[in-house]
Image (tube, rainbow, N blue to C red):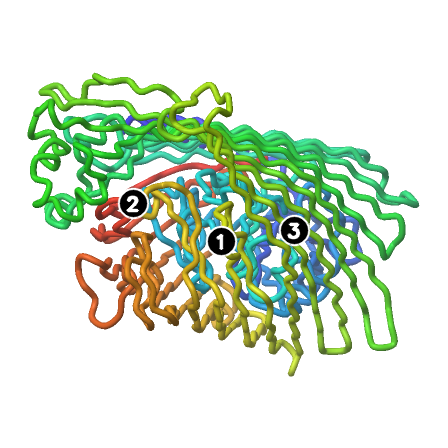
Amino acid sequence: MIALLRVGVLAAFLLAFSASASTSTSVHAQSNGRISGIVFASDTGETIPGANVELVGTTFGAAADMRGRFDISGLPAAPYVLRVSTLGYATSTFNVRVLAGESATVRIPLEPTILEIPELIVERESMLAHPLGMDGIPGSAHRVTARSLEKFEANDINRALRSVPGLNLQEEDGYGLRPNIGIRGSGAERSSKISIMEDGVLVAPAPYAASAAYYFPTVGRMEEIEIRKGSSQIKYGPYTTGGAINLISKSIPEKLSGEARVLAGEEESLTVEGFVGNSWKHGGFLVQAFNAQTDGYKELDGGSNTGFNKTDIMLKGRINTAKSAAIYQALSVKALFTDEVSDETYLGLTDADFRATPNRRYAGSAEDEMNTEYRQVMLRHLVVPRENLKITTTAYRSTFARNWYKLDKVGGVSISSLLEEPADHAQEFSVVQGLSTNTSTPLNVKANNREYLSRGIQSAMQYQTDTRAGALDIELGVRIHEDEMDRFQWVDGFVMTGSGMNLVAPGVPGTDSNRIETATATAFFVQPRLMAGRVTIQPGLRYENISIRREDFGKSDVERTGANLAERRNEVDVWIPGVGISAEIRPGATMFGGVHRGFAPPGSTVGTDPEKSVNYELGARYHDGARRAEVAFFYNDFENLLGTDLAAGGGTGSGDLFNGGEASVRGIEITAGENLGRFLDWRFSVPVGVSYTFTDATFKTSFASDFANWGDVDKDDELPYVPRNQFTVDVGLNTGDFDLALQGTWVDDMRTVAGQGDFVPEQSVESFFVAEFSAGYEVNPNVRIFGIVRNLFDEEYAVARRPAGLRPGLPRTILAGMRVTF
């Protein structure tokens, strides 16, 4: 527990410092009174940073800090009227009496209201900006706020998204390093069927040529996460079936400010994050650093770590004209550097071994390790030539290098086959367990060495005008993009000895897989939005022209002379239409609906068709101060469902896509929340929320498939890794200085192979319930200490049977930390 001791030493120092500061402040305040308090949202209980607090008729005032707190000192004894206002909330006034030498403490709830157009923020791009706020979006949309991320100190995207309905989250390593996310049954394998962005830019290493997300943005450095489903998502593309996820990185602050955060706990887990930034009239900057590391919770036969070490450094800069300039312009640059070393494996456990010791790792995975390096540069220009016209242009370039060195076969038997039928491969299974040292049974460890490139330029114009029918917004956008994946892989031969694995047959780079996959794409979209009274109509049309090419040099031409070059190409032109409508049926109550074309690129295999579907959505939302609710029905009618041969999905790892025929996905999403603090005169904030998803996903045709998770499919077979029922409940308590949060998530049984009827234990994963708990205390407005318990009841549960064998979820883990802001 060395990491916890480090936190304790740092905490003692900071507490002593804060106590000293408090003492000096209290002496100054003896002759005057003061008003201090906290501003929070009445519906969710989340604090509201930056709220403007003023004493009516005086020159006194303050702005709420990053945690929604404010303090106004030096006040003569008198009654005062506080007026509190901020973007997106109704202005409120409160009567407060200040006594000489005393402090009055208040808690101020603000009710959400129609969101005004925010000031221009050039370095980020939101999916949820709308003149009427999220309530005006003609489709299902969700935001995971900074406070929600902070509540459980989420650095795992699976944990961050648990309260969002309609998502299929399949864990793999317990830390969210390589997540598998699907939306509305789109398929979760490596999140390859949804559009994932950071600040509005696609972040998959090669989003068109090889979309499997072996890189995923670090959630621990994010400010917010946005999720958009329904017809309006076609703006983002190229994947338009399920939805889009946009991660919002830390913004350049408006004034000099910063943060230092440390979190430590079991398995030598340690997370450190900090940033500093400032803005002035004509520019601003931000520097942020993040590191997370742990020894891991899995127990490798023979010892050694099973954790990871991941580091992010992000730099942002901005220059801009004065906001009052006739033509406002801003230019921002963002540079991101991410490095990771993780002792992760595809090798899971047999059913028997999982029941006995679920956190065990076989000796045959001792050499498994992932090394990655991600670099991104983004340049964004914003110009506002007229009050009603805005043009944003973004140029981006990213590179990603990774080598996942991992066990692939034992004695010629794939690890997935080995764990499916260990009795049929007794010798090989004995070797992988480290029980046999038979040198005639080699362990083949594959160096899955790949380099990726993604670059392009995208521009969007937004024009607003008034017509006789109502306010009209028109968005036009274009993206010119190219990406590439370069595979240069080899296999090393090991034998098991009494001291572990010994390398006996080093491989030659390029002799396992030696090919380049490239893609070029031109995309265009138009999306007008008419707001006629209480009705919003938003049609849209997207066009994608995609060319995907594979150059396979062969395993014998490692110099890439082209002597045995095999080429193939697949091209597609597609129009993707959609329309969404929302209508306010009463104050705070809105109905919405839409229909759009779902699409996913087909890969380079000749004869593979694009994924196509027609997607329908109908829903309603209600927002009344402390109460909120949303329900959405969806139906995705697939003309052609694509499958991907990924090693992560238990396949061969060729990356080829193939046709899966017709399928249908239908379901319902429900979210609801209430802040019970309103029944307590806001002495406490008690937010309660629930979310529920029902999904029925089935094939509509019978066919034979080489895809491991599909196999031989019969009509009405259910799609694998899509649970029928998911339920999450959140309960919180916030007194101002002290806060508690509890979250529980239940996931239904799910198939791991397509099928119907009764669940077969060897082809399914049992349902599970996992809870998380957090508690925090504000020592002063700048220092917060907190504790977190992940998997509160220490549930032993399996999250998947892929890539090979059963995989455990994170066991109970206790963490403690501190956050300091200035």
Q: Is residue 284 left or right of residue 554?
A: right
Quadrant location of the N terminus in the rendered image: top left
What distance separates the C-alpha of mark 3 from that of mark 2?
Answer: 33 Å
Q: Nearer the viewer, mark 3 or mark 2?
A: 3
Amino acid on which the number 3 mark rests in the picture: Asn
Circle 2: element type: loop
In the picture, the disc for residue 607 is 1
Residue at horizontal 38 percent and vertical 47 percent from the top: 645
Q: Is residue 78 left or right of residue 811?
A: right
Name the quadrant containing residue 31.
top right
x and y percentages locating residue 72 in the rendered image: 66, 47
Residue 67 seen in the figure: no
Q: Which residue is mark 2?
A: 803
Residue at horizontal 22 percent and vertical 50 percent from the top: 794
Residue at horizontal 17 percent and vertical 44 percent from the top: 419
Residue at horizontal 26 percent and vertical 64 percent from the top: 749
Residue 128 seen in the figure: yes
x and y percentages locating residue 639 in the rendered image: 49, 67
Q: Which residue is mark 3?
A: 545
Q: Are marks 1 and 3 in contact (CB under 8 Å)?
A: no
Circle 3: element type: strand
* Foreground residue among 241 and 707: 707
